Image (spheres, coloured by chain):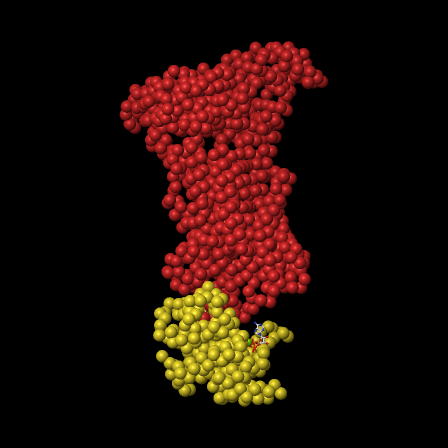
Amino acid sequence: MWKITLKSLLAHKLRLALTAIAIVLGVTFVSGTYILTDTIHNTFTSLFSTVYRGFDFQVRGVAQFSGPGTAVRNPIPESILPKIRKVPGVEDAAGSVVGYAQFVSHGGKAIANGGAPTIGASLHSKTLSYLHIVEGRAPTTSHGVVMDAGTAKKYHFKVGQQVRVLLFGPPRTFTITGIARFGDTANLAGATMAAFDTTTAQKVLGEVGKFNAIYVKVAPGAGKLAIQRDIARVLPRGVDVVTRQAVVNEAISSINQPLSFLSTTLLIFAFIALFVGAFTILNTFSVVVGQRTRELALLRVVGASRRQVFRSVLVEAAILGLVSSLIGLGLGVLTAMGIEALLRGFGISIPSGSPVLAARTVIMALVLGVGVTILAAISPARRAVRIPPVAAISDSHVVDVSLRRRFTWGASIAIAGAAVLGIGLSNHAVQLVGLGALGVFIGVAMLLPAVASPLSSAIGRPLARTLGVAGRLGRANSMRSPRRTAQTASALMIGLAVVSAFAVIGASISKSVTSVADNAVSADLIVYGKMSSPMSPGFSTTVPRVVAALPGVTATNTIYGHTPMSGQFKFRHSLETLTGVSARHLAGTIRLHMTAGDSRALASGTMLIDATVAKSDHLSVGDTVPVRFALTGRSTVRIGGVYKPNPIVGSYLVSDSYYLPHFQNPLPSGVLLRTSGGSAVEREVQHALAPYPNVQVQNRAQLEHSQLAQIDKLLGLVYALLALAVIIALIGIVNTLVLSVFERTREIGLLRAVGMKRRQVRIMIRAESVILSIFGAVVGIIIGTGLGVALASSLGSAGITDISVPASSMVVFIILSAVLGLLAATWPARRAAKLDVLAAIAAE
Amino acid sequence: MPMESVNGSPAAHALDLHKAYGTGQAVVNALDGISVTFEQGRFTAVMGPSGSGKSTLMHCMAGLDRPTSGRSFVGGVDVGSLNDTELTRLRRDRVGFVFQSFNLVPTLTAGENITLPLDLAGTKVDKGWFDHLAGQLGIAGWLTHNPSELSGGQQQRVACARALISRPELVFADEPTGNLDSIASAEILSFLRTSVKDLGQSIVMVTHDPRGAAYADRVVFLADGKVVGEMEQPTADSVLERIRLLAG
Ligand SMILES: Nc1ncnc2c1ncn2[C@@H]1O[C@H](COP(=O)(O)OP(=O)(O)OP(=O)(O)O)[C@@H](O)[C@H]1O
Ligand SMILES: [Mg+2]
């Protein structure tokens, strides 16, 4: 049996290669994702170990609550430092201040590398600092700054030059007194660093008289555990001491969160590709089993047991899966670099070192590759064992499982999938959504043979009419085996379902954004921080003052919070983002559509919440809700009104007079302006804000446009990631067509004998391919649209207020699918046309 | 329009055809210098032992295969001088085929199979001719059926109609009754006979059956790739006699 399996594998190298590609690509994607994220993780881990060196303990504020990836901590008074120094066994201790500081390039642009942070820090004790000044010296006055070597090199700064630095407060110009490296490396994953003397740092980054942390080094040979206890004893409430290792671990886990987001996202697309690949494999094996019916029956005649037949098909799949997985793993390394380049092309920059191939990656690749292949081969293998021995001698060997049973199963799975999907959507459980979608896809794929013939017939009608008998034959071929057609189209269906689901979500976001400009804002100009640095919690407090002073500006409203770095607070039990606005100019700048209460309630210190929160938390006007702030602790707030979701102000809105006292260094994140004139005032505002390259001024049209552009970019990335799934689906079509051509050798020979031209043969195959592709596309688009609408409507809280189905995109998808189908047919069609007429006729 | 029988102008003829398969030691001379003429308006049977080159001869003469050397003509056209497209057109417009089995395209109905050569050419179907053929062959009731729903005999009758639908100059039939019982065979053979007699159709038919050969006007005997004999107005007995003679 082994010999037969191997022979069968080797006898069809082409089929083997085509099937393998589907698995190879999926495994490549999966392993590429793991390799990429492992590599990034590794890079960061070694970076953090380098950076956090030279100290034994860190003293810092207790985490008030942990946000996504970062903990919110209050600064600690500097008066702690002398007490720590006095603790026996402490050799050295230094206070450190960290905050937001962003260099401005010679050309006047705010410097930021991809999404990497722009850090401002104090330059404290030489032994404790991770900054090594490699050129110049530490600043001695409040006008000096040390720049990181990476930035200095990239933006051509030299010691002695002036540089503008954007800060919490007004931007300032400093003299570069030195250039420093992080530990041994010039570049901390793209982060930029501006280091000041401690007093200056306190002034421009944090708070006078406070540190963010104190670093402690113990004398050699001292008992660390005892010293840590002794330090803890001198600390006031709300301050604690942790080991260096804890700090490193925290830092690493802080990047784990965004990294796992990246890997999850990529893996989702990789799994989609693998899933589509599974259908391709399933299909190929089905066709192959069909074509080997006689051979398998003959094996049964000469005494092979059902188990042996079953096993021979599965072993074939396992070998195929194994070889493909290994190839995929190898290609994964290359792909890791490719994905990185792709992401970078879309503006997401990530650091990386030499590729890391973890054991987990290898295991996952092999398990997934082999597993998926074997799973996909089970159904064909089951069909193989049902071939009766008599099929070897008789011609009527149609072994078809009861379609009724198949449809019952398919319908059940599809319905169950839809139910799980619905539950997942209403509970925001991504895994359930994925599982549900999987169920829907499998269920629909099982049901698809029921509609394959009529749909192919309808799709093929225009082709049959315009392409003559070749078109008619192509159409007939697409209808002759509903099961094969359905299986082949399934792969493309899934690919296009996901594509169109994203298209719907994208279009809905776009439409929601468009209505933001119309429905959320009534201001003429919008000033907001360029979110070029995640460290940036906003922009200088001088900005609102600068613009308010301009003659053409009639009203301003400053927005606080509502960014990933500011406004974090606990609302009941969950960490949320608060927004603060001026209650006075609310009406003239922001459009709040109240569903309950009055927006004027803001002025009396109540909180407004959006309708989504009100609904999910069962809150109504007048309710009192517990809240907690890092700075001020627990308190309660009354709900003063409920508004329709408004992306400009987020879900939790208070007046600025409520907001400001609850936050450390609150910074504006936006300013909304009413102006008395058009573009002249706009130019004035632009001019006045020229010294603040980290803010951007846009009118409503520009705001809308830039937001749409951002969405399109993101959607482009998603499409690029989905392209692989579509390519795999197309390979499936190529595979089916090649196998069909092979199967129909005699038929094609006959057609050629009675006068079919090669061109007509090609047309016939292409017509079939186009019909298959459109069939898959149409079903996929229908399902994807439903999925997209469901997803989009469950994302109301994320700012999707309008649902839009982009009909034009759908038409483009169908046309594109037809073109891709045509492409997929190129090679099979050529093969078919090249068939030797005589050999075809003579073939037994 | 029945074909005019023009004496002297053959429907097809071959001049010193050679066809060799394989190379070196293993070379098989399937055709070893065959010159033969198939007259217009006549029913010619080709007989010979298995492997004698009957099918090869037919394939070479009909432009399905190219001889190693020698020339063959269909209605005066040198088949060897045609390129692939011209050969395709020749098969489509001027030659009809009936094979032993697998004659029909499974995705087309019987009726569509019959008109296939015309559809491929994009020419209109002569309704009268179509009905005549269907009536003659007794398949008028089966035209909308798929081939899989037809018996072997019915399938062969559809194939005959297809071979004749384009009014070809010549029909090649390679053991058209090889898979049929004697009654079904007789129906096919009488039809072929009738179309030669009434319509002046030219037919070349390969057969192993002396009774089948008796329907023909003439029998050509092959052995080892050579023409080894001929017989006009054969009967089953005379053919059988000759076969015994040739074998002995
Ligand atoms: N494609 C091929 N390759 C090699 N040899 C071939 C090929 N086709 C035919 N032959 C050989 O050529 C010879 C003639 O074959 P052909 O099919 O013409 O015989 P036939 O008279 O039609 O026989 P049958 O009555 O069995 O159909 C045989 O010896 C056969 O083995
Ligand atoms: Mg033969």
Q: Is residue B239 left or right of residue A669?
A: right
Which quadrant, please, contains the N terminus of chain A?
Answer: bottom right
> Looking at the image, which is closer to me, B81 or A798?
A798
- Position of residue B247 relative to residue A348, above or below, is below
Image coordinates for residue A535, horizontal then vertical, percent: 49, 25
Which quadrant is home to the C terminus of chain A? Answer: bottom right
Q: Is residue A797 left or right of residue A177?
A: left
Residue at the location (50% across, 24% down)?
A575
Tell me if residue A713 comes above or below residue A680 in the rendering: below
Q: Colour of chain B?
A: yellow
Residue, far right: A221
Ligand 1 positioned in quadrant? bottom right
Q: Can residue A701 be seen?
A: yes
- Determine the residue positioned at 58% across, 42% down: A31
Q: Position of residue B108 (x, y in %)?
A: 44, 65
Q: Is A184 above or below relative to A478?
A: above
Chain shaded red: A
* Residue B116 picture quarter: bottom left
Residue at 48% x, 84% y: name it: B216
